[in-house]
Image: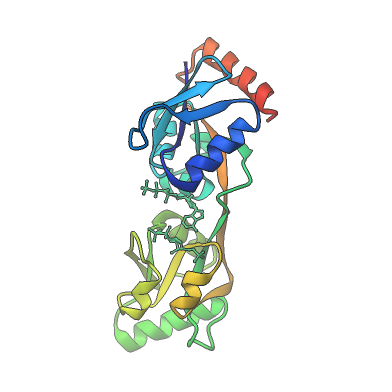
Amino acid sequence: MLKLGVPSKGRLMEKTFDWFGARGVGLRKSGSDREYAGAVDGFDGIELVLLSAGEIPRELAAGNIHLGVTGSDLVREKLANWDSRVAELAPMGFGGADLIIAVPQGWVDVNTLDDLDAAAAAFRRKHGFRLRIATKYHRLVREFLREQGVADYQIVDSQGATEGTVKNETAEAIADITSTGETLRANGLKILDDGLIHASQATLFRGLRNNWTDEQRAKLKALQLVLGI
Ligand SMILES: Nc1ncnc2c1ncn2[C@@H]1O[C@H](COP(=O)(O)OP(=O)(O)OP(=O)(O)O)[C@@H](O)[C@H]1O
Ligand SMILES: O=P(O)(O)OC[C@H]1O[C@H](OP(=O)(O)OP(=O)(O)O)[C@H](O)[C@@H]1O
């Protein structure tokens, strides 16, 4: 059996079912609405596993599932050296969202990462501590800011309602996912001109752990043929 991990709820789950269904592979929840059991119609040898989108990267890397659908942002955030542990088989064209850095609209002189760097140095001199960036994307934000030469900041963890941290004065800037931009606007924040960290979308991945049988490798080839990827 090839184990396929799919997000267990919401839009990502439904659109994943639609994407496979449009290619002749039927995925569905098999139990009651609240039960996380799945079934596959129209293709033998695949087992559907319903999981939290955030856990799918780790399960792929561990070899507990062979294939998985999740956001490209989550794979990069959850796995160090992600591309040595999983491989992208197909971008799926939904679940699009941008991971960005945003600052208060009132910071009229701060529009770029260079401006942020200067503001961060000034902030530290004035307040005696580093400018705080609230995010749940610790790895991606650290890597991005290191590459861009911004150093004088600290990350504060925020697992939800991240845009509210600035008004609540627990952070000066944020890094989060945005799609329509409504939440940023409603919280008086603006995206830095060069503040796009990653443009994410739902993606089908395979794990690269070397624990596959010949039969499983052949099964993946057959599936790729059916899906046209
Ligand atoms: N508007 C949006 N807001 C949040 N995430 C979005 C949005 N649009 C697309 N996504 C993507 O959806 C994925 C997150 O999905 P979800 O919140 O179900 O994951 P999760 O954190 O594992 O959830 P849970 O732990 O509650 O099961 C990410 O890849 C993210 O980029
Ligand atoms: O650009 P927009 O269309 O306004 O969407 C972006 C918002 O949606 C997400 O939050 P979600 O409601 O999924 O909950 P979360 O805060 O737990 O991530 C994300 O974290 C942003 O807050």
Residue 178 in percent (x, y) is at 51, 63
Tell which of 42 and 104 is nearer to you. Answer: 42
Name the residue rendered at 48%, 17% in the picture: 212
Asked if one can make out residue 131 in the rendered structure from this viewpoint, the answer is no
In this orientation, which residue lies closer to the viewer: 75 or 10? 10
Q: Residue 208, percent across and down? A: 50, 28
User: Which residue is most to the top?
Assistant: 215
Q: Residue at x 33, y 37 (%)?
A: 34
What residue do we see at 48% from left, 44% from top? 75
Residue 91, placed above or below residue 190: above
Count numbered badges in the picture.
0
Image position of 135 (left or right of 202): left
- Above or below, comparing residue 213 to residue 227 in the picture: above
Question: Which one is in front, 116 or 46?
Answer: 46
Across and down, in percent, residue 126 comes to 34, 89
Is 146 positioned to the left or the right of 166 in the image? Answer: right
Q: Quadrant of ligand 2?
A: bottom left
Image position of 217 with respect to 181: above or below: above
Do we see residue 218 in this rendering?
yes
Point out residue 102 in the picture as x, y percentages from the top left corner: 49, 73
Considering the image in quadrants, where does the C terminus appear? top right
Relative to residue 193, is residue 110 depicted above or below? Answer: below
Image quadrant assignment for residue 214: top right
Name the image colouring.
rainbow
Residue placed furthest toward the front: 32
Image-based side of 108 in relation to 128, left or right? right
**Residue located at (39% from left, 30% from top):** 62
Task: Determine the image quadrant of residue 227.
Answer: top right
